[in-house]
Every structure is written in structure tokens, then in C-alpha cells.
Amino acid sequence: MTTPPTTTDRLDERLDAIADGFSTSGRSPVLHTPAEHGLRFEDVTFPSEDGTPLEGWFVPAEGADTVVIVNHPRWFSRSGLPSHLEPWRSAHAATGNDVEVDFVPDIAILHSAGYHVLAYDLRNFGLSGAANGGLTTGGNLESRDVIGSLRYVRSRPELRDAKIALFGRCLGANAILFAMERAPSEFADVRCLVACQPLSARMVLTRNLERQGIPVECLDELDRRIRLRTGFGLDSMSPARAARSVRTPTLVYQVHDDLMTRPADVQAVFDAIRDDVPKDLLWIHGTTRRWDGYLHFQRNPDRILDWLARHTR
């Protein structure tokens, strides 16, 4: 645990540092490519809903009739995060997340299962364009990138009749949920969603304050400071509200004892999805490391592949 602040000035500095760090995100590089797994791929660029240029890979699979659109968590790029290296190691070591996450094996698994894959960087991450002053908004403005990815897939002649599935992680999963709430017509032909570890701003910051020995009563003041930086309050960055708009079969999965959140947070997202929508919740046990949730698919793909197959074939 970080040493608790001992003076009012020190507490003020700490809260400013947390608010600054939460309102923007450093980029991580795209260090891996599908070529490492012998996959043919195309570097692509396409506009977000608001015109922000997004970068990605399109990985075709011979004979496939479904495309899986994949995005990434906060701080990551489409290729993952080198959090075994500085400066990312120091940034994430307090929660045990100082191991590399390479997402390219996930693409290889999906390709081997017979899916086309579009993997892309969200705005202000990876190689995609800067937008909105570099702000990170818990999925609100990032939802525009989800809509851009759907429109791009539908614009490719060879994918015009393809079925579509979505695979979102953390910030990327939040962005999908916010996009579903804001523009439901864009998802009318989406067959299913896999949502890895959606996360509310209020919960992650509560856990952050606890680790730093800062009274949780400071959360309201932190909310005020983040709103002044981004225009968004903590509750407006909660995916649970947006999840009420989901009409697409959804599998949610989460590390149960993740040090960055609590089980109740993702349970609230899952419970908010209507009961008449096919849904499933997968808890990952035996670890407190959030990154193990991101690595789960490449370690144990069967349940997620079964979900995709059930709703696309």
C-alpha cells in the first residue's frame, strides 16, 4: 500500500495526481502482429463515428461467414500491453499486473476457429488518432469508435453478408455498452457480445483510494475534479446503466477477486442486462490479478468459443 498522505497539501496533491491520471491515458506501443502466428493480415484505417482515424488489422479466414470485432482495455493497444517493462511495470505493479499481455494469440485462436477478425485501437491508444484533447471517458466518447468499426465492416464488399460478433475488453467493453445505449439501431444485426471485465469508474477509484490509504470520503471531491477535467462524472462512466439497453446475447467474464474492483461491480452490469436477453456470467477464480482476465481466453478459450458458435452458426 502507498504511504497515506499526512497533510492537507499532500492530500490535495495526491487527489490532483489521481484525477489527472484518470482523465487521460498514456499510449502503449503496438509491439506484436498477426504475422508472428503465420497469419495473413491487412493494416487498415477507418473513421470513427466522428471522423477520428482508427488503426487496426483485418485478418481474413478462408471460408468464414462471421467477423469478430475486437477492441482492448484502457492503457492497452490492439496488440496488448508490455507491462513487464517500464514505465508500464511501475504503473501496474501495485495490483500485481506487472506481466506482459499479448493479445495476438487471441486473434490466432479466433482465426483458427473459422472467424475473420478486425482488431483495432481505440482513440488515443495504440496508433489511432488523438481526439477530445486526449481524454479518456470510461467508454462514453470511445463508443464512437465502436460504431465506426461496425460501419467499416459493413462497408467491405467481402463482409457485406457476414455475421458480426463483438469482443470488448474493459474500456472497450464499456464503449460497446455505451454505444448500444446511444445508437441501438447500429447493433440490429450483431449476433452476440463477449464483454471481458467491464468496469465502473466509481469502483476502480474507490479501490485506488483504499490502496493509497486515502479516506474513501474523498471520492466525491475526486469526482468533482474529474468532472472539471473531462466533463463526465463518475456515475456517467458506469456501464451498468448502459447495460440496460443491451438486446444482444452477451457473455460477461471477470476475475472474481480482482484487486482493481469488487465482484458486485461486474455483477451489477450483468444483472442490468434484461432477463429476456440470452446472457451468461463467467467468474475466473484463483487469482487477484486483473491481467489474468485478459489472458483467460488464450488459456481457456472453449467457453467463449462455444458462446460465439452458439450465436453465429
Image (cartoon, rainbow, N blue to C red):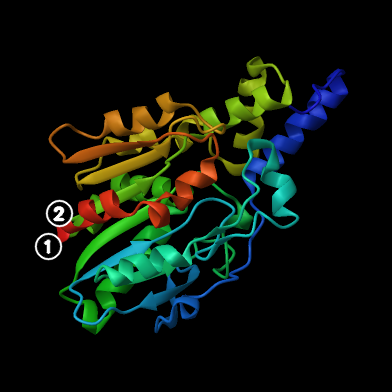
**Which x, y percent locates residue 30?**
58, 69
- Image quadrant assignment for residue 4: top right
| The N terminus - image quarter | top right
Observer-nearest residue: 101 or 269?
101
| Vertical position of residue 88 compared to residue 278: above or below | below
- The secondary element bearing badge 1 is classed as loop
Q: Residue at point 56% right, 33% down?
A: 260
Decide: few, some or many residues near mark 1? Use Cα within 10 Å; few <14, some 14-19, many ≥20. few
Closer to us: 299 or 138: 299
Q: Position of residue 12 (x, y in %)?
A: 80, 26
The quadrant of the picture occupied by the C terminus is bottom left
Residue 22: horizontal and vertical position, in percent? 63, 41
Q: Secondary structure at mark 2?
A: helix
Q: Identify residue for label 2.
A: 310
Q: Is residue 258 left or right of residue 39?
A: right
Packing grade of label 2 (10 A; few <14, some 14-19, many >=20) is few
The answer to which quarter of the image holds residue 271 is: top left
What residue is shown at x 51% (from left), y 36% (from top)? 287
Q: How many circles with numbers are drawn on the protein?
A: 2
Residue 91: % across, % down? 71, 46
Return the residue at label 1: 313
